[in-house]
Image: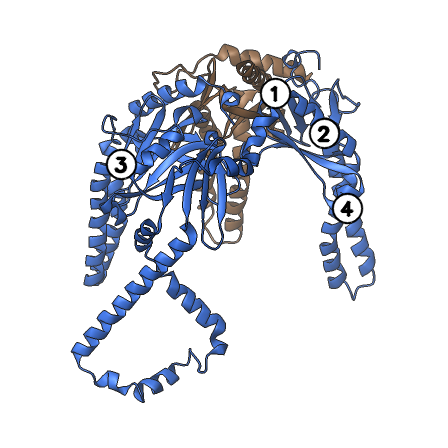
Amino acid sequence: MEQEHTGRLSDEAVANGPAASLREDEEAPLTRLHPNHVKALRVHAMLFAVPLIIAALALEAAGLAFRGLALAPMAIFCVWLVLLMPVRRHNARGYDMGADRLRVVRGILFRSDTVVPFGRVQHLDVAQGPIERYYGIATLTLHTAGTHNASVSLPGLAHATALAMRETIRAHVRRETL
Amino acid sequence: MSKPDSAQPGSVRHGSTGRLDLEEGWRRTSPLGIVTQGLRSLRRAVLPVAAILFSTRSAEFGVGIAVGVGIAIVTLNLLVTTIAWWNTQYRIGSTDVRLHSGILGRQARSVPFERIQDVSLEQGPLARLLRLVEVRFETGAGGKDELKLAYVSQEEGAALRETVRARIDTDPASAQSAVAGGEKAASSAAEETPLFTMGPRRLLVFGLFEFSLVFFAVLAGAAQQLDFLLPFDLWDFDGWEERLAGPGAWLAGAGPSVRVIGAVLAILALAAVGLITGVARTFARDFGFRLDRTSKGFRRRRGLFTRTDVVMPVHRVQAVTVSTGFLRRRWGWHGLGFISLAHDAKSANHTIAPFAQIGELAPIAHAAGYKLPGAEIAWHRPSKRYRLDRAIMSAALPALAALAAAALGFALVAIAALVLAAALAVRHRFLWQHERHALDERQVLSRTGWLAPRLMVASRQKLHSVRIVQGPLAQLRGYANLRFGLAGGSLSLDGLPLSEARHLRAAVLSSIAAVDFSQLPR
């Protein structure tokens, strides 16, 4: 059943096409990440927000802050964190799978744009945390032999897409060598 | 193993969890591995159990609670370990080694055979007792992220090693060359003319620049450690005062001219000690320095008391550095270093020729396949905006401090802080003149620093990745840092105009992608 699930998601990802909202680039347009990535980011943000809300509630219960004075700003912050931030983060990310290289773009304040040629990939990881697993998405990580920026990870791919990309890259490694 | 993996991606992991879903070629590690884990958790349970025993020693069921908690910890650990073991599966496929693991999440690692440099077997005492081994597939990715199977049976481990080694198509001769190089080179290179040597005269000059006051640190340390050997108490200040008041009283009575002479003498003594220390250390470290180009690579011998003999294979050299000092630069003295992924040295930067004129360094760099920049090279500067922003930012903090000090009425502190702010801003004025980068057909060059500039020359082909990084200010002002993935070191061109960063990246990527990693000599 899950097989079906991931299969459907990968179709969506392909249909989604290049991202229009990503910033101008004279290089190839970026492919957007899977829509479920936003949901997964939201769940992560929620897990981060819950202790904050509890802390605000505790502060008010203990009488250290007037009613609503701690909770209201915290609630507004958490709404921003859970509802708006994941969308922005999702929009800032993208990748471009070239013929012999993978480009990974991410970050809002601190923007990073990395290109790893397949010929330099040492090994590959496809990883899913529990939340990612629930949403059928995965993180693809490319490891190189460099000392800095040695690993480049690309989160928010449909699991099937991540596996397919891994196969493509691995096949390239092999072909190049033979 | 026969069908392509992409046909049914992840099918192994996503079958129903209840049945034994090992597909063709997939294996689990030895179940005996759970036993070693269980014993390890037993050891971990000792401390909490002891704590409970201690805190409930007066209670009626203290021992019972402690034993119960101990059993619970071990059982829980065993349960988790067993599930983890069940979910950990590996496969020696036709093109790669795969490892799937994870309890709640799922991790899948794939290591292509082409990248495996060696398979090593490790065995702790407990594993030895149970006839188990830990198999590590080493890829040269810095050693940290390699694939590890803990544990499989000894026979399985040996078989795995044979299987994988048979599929790695590097000839063993070249892999061993780095190890065997030292002894073989010793006989053949003796008669060749060395690439670089340093005689006593050169060492003396070198030593003078290596001025060091480490002697005093050693002295202070020794005084602290060995003060019981002295006939008086070194730290007894009353005693010192007495000595000064008694036999040393003439010091206080001497005129100001005597004091000035005394101060000058003290400074001269300090300088002499510093110089002598520098020369002595240099002689001890670099005596008989000799660099040869042997068939196996660069061979460096040096040392007076401990003589070291190091062979650095040419293909391991990722980049060369030319560094200098603030003072020695006036006379044209530079040092050459190699950056490599060698594990044997503490620092990745290998000293190849520590003290030489540029004219002597160029042939050595050339022998390693690098070309030091000449007059023909087109240097580029970072963005002007970047330099301006950096100057403002570096001066901002001391300037603020100056303002605060002025507000509080500390005039001297305010002036000092202001001078510091100005100095930091001026530094960037000179960095603007000195920091630069260039790209030639085969190399990336970067020059950093002002008073003691450092040049780094990296081979374009041997880079691993290229990243463009922009902080908030950089995004606003349109510049970026260009960071290269370099094995054994870091190479970053900071503050380039964004368009230039993109252009450089495209150029370097085309040379990286042209050659596969496995085809680079290793």
Task: Using the image as rendered, state which of residue B347 and residue B183 is in the foreground.
Answer: B183
Label 2 resides on the chain identified as B
State the quadrant of the N terminus of chain B: top right
Side of B92 where B202 appears, left or right: left
Residue under disc 2 on the same chain as residue under disc 4: yes
**Cα–Cα gap, marks 2 and 3:** 53 Å
Residue located beneath label 2 in the image: B87
Kindly identify which residue carries mark 4. B39
Give the left or right position of residue B335, taking residue B131 as reference.
left
Relative depth, front residue between B333 and B99:
B333
Q: Where residue B344 appears, x then y in whole percent?
A: 53, 42
Which comes before the other along the chain, label 4 or label 3? Answer: 4
Tell me if label 2 and label 1 are in contact, CB under 8 Å: no
Query: Which residue is denoted by mark 1 in the rendering?
Result: B169
- The percent coordinates of residue B9 (x first, y second) are 65, 16
What's the distance in space between the residues labelled 3 and 1, CA to CA?
A: 44 Å
Q: Residue drawn 47% across and 39% down?
A: B190
The answer to whether marks 4 and 1 mark residues whose Cβ atoms lie closer than 8 Å is: no
Q: Earlier in the sequence, mark 4 or mark 1?
A: 4
> In this picture, is B222 found above or below B75?
below
- What is the secondary structure assignment of the residue under circle 3? loop
Q: Position of residue B481 (x, y in %)?
A: 34, 31
The residue type indicated by label 4 comes to Leu
> As shown in the figure, which amino acid type bears the numbered disc 2?
Asn
